[in-house]
Amino acid sequence: NAGVTQTPKFRVLKTGQSMTLLCAQDMNHEYMYWYRQDPGMGLRLIHYSVGEGTTAKGEVPDGYNVSRLKKQNFLLGLESAAPSQTSVYFCASSYVNNEQFFGPGTRLTVL
Amino acid sequence: AQSVTQPDIHITVSEGASLELRCNYSYGATPYLFWYVQSPGQGLQLLLKYFSGDTLVQGIKGFEAEFKRSQSSFNLRKPSVHWSDAAEYFCAVGSGGSQGNLIFGKGTKLSVKP
């Protein structure tokens, strides 16, 4: 089992460009999450999904959109990237009310 | 609102010494509690979790944590630290609600002196 995988691992964008981060899990988890990690800030929840076809906002959703068309995939989109979105992005998945399993992260730099 | 406080931003211990990382939470009911570890450039790995029952929980890599309801704490301990334990440690609290969301502390970075 691969667990949780994230694509790409690194990306550099210019301000105003768009991109999509892909998260995939092979554990048949219902719940999936996108976090961003910034120095001294811990992990902050961007969006999450409690099942295929559902999404909800987390703590810091502005500037991001998500989609969960298939149970195993959770996509995070940046429509118009800003330097403030420079961060490390983590995807996680879980069964309901249980520990979350994390992917290796995507390091994004917006110039 | 739920919150998690890790009072120590950075701790340095000598190899072989004991370790205690502090975690305090704010939550109205009995929370679900977790400790995760993150090595440089890596994702987060679960060390241990507490849902209910015995308040002293054992985890991987020789770590343990004790839930103290009266102190709203869930401190992580290890009797003898190894150089490979150098990493960042995150405490998290979950509500157990339908969303399954976790609130993370800001982390404690552990350095190990030889």
Image (cartoon, helix red, strand yellow):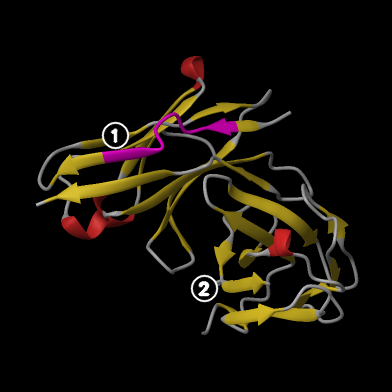
Q: Nearer the viewer, residue A85 or B86?
A: A85
The residue labelled by disc 2 is A104
Is residue B9 found inside the magenta-colored segment of the image? yes
Of helix, strand and loop, which one carries label 1? Answer: strand
Asked whether the residues under marks 1 and 2 belong to the same chain, the reply is no
The answer to whether A28 appears left or right of B81 in the picture is right
Which of the 4 image quadrants contains residue A83? bottom right
User: Which residue is disc 1 drawn over?
Assistant: B20
Crowding at label 2, few (<14), some or many (≥20) Cα neighbours within 10 Å?
many
Is residue A88 visible in this depiction of the protein?
Answer: yes
Between A108 and B73, the residue placed more toward the observer is A108
Q: Please name the amino acid that badge 1 sits on.
A: Glu
Residue A25 showing in the rendered view = no
Q: Position of residue B106 (x, y in %)?
A: 53, 42
Q: Position of residue B112 (x, y in %)?
A: 19, 49
In the depicted view, which residue is nearer to us: A73 or A42? A42
